[in-house]
Amino acid sequence: MTTLTKRTALVVAATVVLTGSGAVSAAAAPPAHDVSMREVAARVLSVGVPGYVARIDDGRRVRTTVAGLADRETGRPLNGREQFEVGSNTKTFMAVLALQLVDRGRLKLDRPVGDYLPGVVPDGDHITVRMLLNHTSGLFSYTSDPAFFERMNEDPQHVYTERELLDVAFGHAPNFAPGQGWSYSNTNYTLIGMILQRLTGQSLPDLVERRIAKPLGLDRTYFADPRATHTGRGYAHGYAVSFAGAQPVHTDVSEWPIGGWGGAAGAIISTPEDLARFFEAVLGGELFSRAQLAQMRSTVDIPESFGIKGGYGLGLIRIDSVCGTVWGHGGDTMGHHSTAVASADGRRTAVTDATAEPVDSEPNAGAERFYRVVMAADTATICHLLNKPVPAAVADALRG
């Protein structure tokens, strides 16, 4: 969700992080790896992250690892079951809702956006619903506007309307002609959210609750409208971190309105267990037809410059890691970096949350170290999920 120009690899966060300061629900000792989950967790916390949780279900047992704090002010430790902002994992929820409408004959992937939102999108007669879902529309992402987060910092409680977000995006020229490239754009999913609401006459919170959360029994998953409604005990606070000074400075952003700027691109609140269950259901084809699962898994290549090797489908990423291929998504808000991946059949899942996000407008050594270590931890997690040893280069990057 954060500015793509400075956080390219972390915006999608398609790879996974797993931490380790304690194992829960482990039926037996975990397999040996070159780098333990405990070590991964320690390295992530060393770069200014207050708290870190990782839940791995390898198809035989569930291991949940937690480290650090859920709330810096009170000193409350993480327990691994907290709710948190899942950021752009929300896109997979929106894609599921869209594909359910395709199954019902209410929505067609290759029809122009202009058919569903007349007059809303420049060149909307040449941009299809599919192009929004797989980021080939060329539309500029509102979060890539250099002034967007500056304005948010000045007025963090402002709740943006969809029209305000689109005005930011459409104030910039498209990145390329429709269908002629790939660029990650939160604007695409703002429009998907608008289409969902127009076709159903229901709000996004209601759609998430009725069509995903309730059928799957996700009791602690909801769409923030516009804020998380419970940010005390049982909630992992998120922190915007500045590395510009001698020591990191943490700002608690838990009560900022994530739904007021993330919206359909990033406003879901969930837990590690709920998010794992969701991706299990997505890859298992429980929420829509097998035909739509095939559409979701039909990918376009992600450019090498994006920092992730793989492809982007319809709200779903194929990650071709050094330890093997997994499917999922991830997300970054002003205070969280989360990831969720699964095996191709959904039977193995891994979900993580790091309760921090760098916010400095200029590059610095602290932020660069944060990214290097967190992305290495993401890769190490996939290796653990797939029961593969962590490569030496990844282990070296974890050391910062």
Image (cartoon, helix red, strand yellow):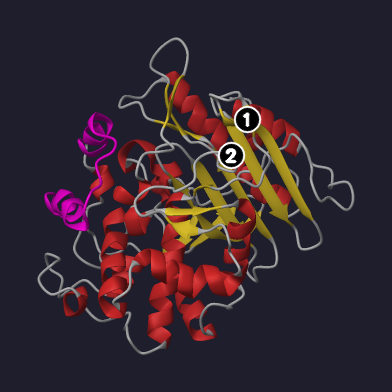
User: Image point 25% across, 81% down: which residue?
Assistant: 111
- On the question of residue 385 being in view, the answer is yes
Residue 145 falls left or right of residue 311 = left
What label does residue 233 carry, if any? 2
Q: CA distance from mark 2 to mark 1?
A: 8 Å
Residue 113 falls left or right of residue 260 = left
Q: How far across and how far down the image is residue 231, in percent?
A: 49, 41
Q: Nearer the viewer, residue 172 or 284?
A: 284
User: Image point 64% across, 56% down: which residue?
Assistant: 273
Q: Amino acid at mark 2?
A: Arg
Q: How far across and how far down the image is residue 222, in percent?
A: 47, 59
Pointers 2 and 1 in contact (CB under 8 A)?
A: yes
User: Image point 47% across, 75% down: which residue?
Assistant: 211
Quarter-of-image position of residue 23: top right
Name the residue beneath numbered marker 1. Answer: 76
Q: Amino acid at mark 1?
A: Arg
Residue 180 falls left or right of residue 283 = left
Which segment is the magenta one?
A: 147-175
Residue 225 falls left or right of residue 208 = left
Quarter-of-image position of residue 279: bottom right
Q: How far across and how far down the image is residue 280, in percent?
A: 62, 67
Q: How far across and how far down the image is residue 282, in percent?
A: 56, 71
Q: Nearer the viewer, residue 324 or 288?
A: 288
